[in-house]
Image: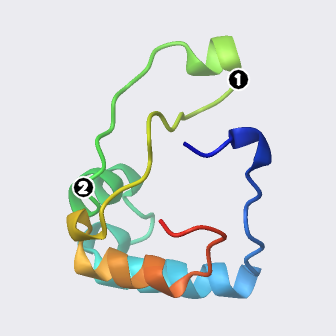
Amino acid sequence: MNDPGKFKAPFISKERIWQETEKLRAAHPAGRGVPVQVLELAEFDLGLELIPAEGLREELEIDALLMGDLKISQNELDPEVRQVLSSIEWNEPF
């Protein structure tokens, strides 16, 4: 497992973020409207498991938490998501 203390997120320009966001929104029904249905997009279109956790804001002053090993097989991804993720330059393969 990678040492979280040594992790450095890659720089991605605002323009690139907007481009990739628009590709993702166009590829998934929950992302096409305004406001974007973020929970539906994450859970149903991207296949992420959302588990409510009580007290995050009160105890940790955060809204959300990513847990566990986030390494996933590319075969598990929706083809459109795989294409978007593949187009981003990462320090390490996802």
Say which residue appears at 69% left-offset and 41% top-offset.
4
Amino acid type at mark 2: Gly
Q: Residues within 10 Å of mark 1 (few under 14, many from 20)?
A: few
**Residue placed most toward the observer, 5 or 11:** 5
Q: Residue furthest front?
A: 1
- Identify the residue position indicated by label 2 in the image: 47
Q: Is residue 92 left or right of residue 77?
A: right
Helix, strand or loop for disc 1: loop
The answer to which image quadrant residue 91 occupies is: bottom right
Q: Quadrant of the N terminus?
A: top right
- Identify the residue position indicated by label 1 in the image: 61
Helix, strand or loop for disc 2: loop
Decide: is 77 above or below 19: above
**Residue placed most toward the observer, 59 or 29:** 59
Residue 87, position in %: x, y? 50, 87
Q: Is residue 24 left or right of residue 15?
A: left
Say which residue appears at 37% left-offset and 25% top-offset.
52
Say which residue appears at 46% left-offset and 76% top-offset.
85
Q: Earlier in the sequence, mark 2 or mark 1?
A: 2
Residue 29, position in %: x, y? 25, 73
* Front label number (2 vs 1): 2
Query: What numbered label is drawn on residue 26?
Result: none
Residue 67, position in %: x, y? 47, 34
**Residue placed most toward the observer, 37 or 84:** 84
**Label 2 with label 1: CB-CB less than 8 Å:** no
- Mark 2 and mark 1: Cα distance apart in space: 26 Å
Amino acid type at mark 1: Glu
Decide: is 53 above or below 23: above
Residue 41, position in %: x, y? 32, 60
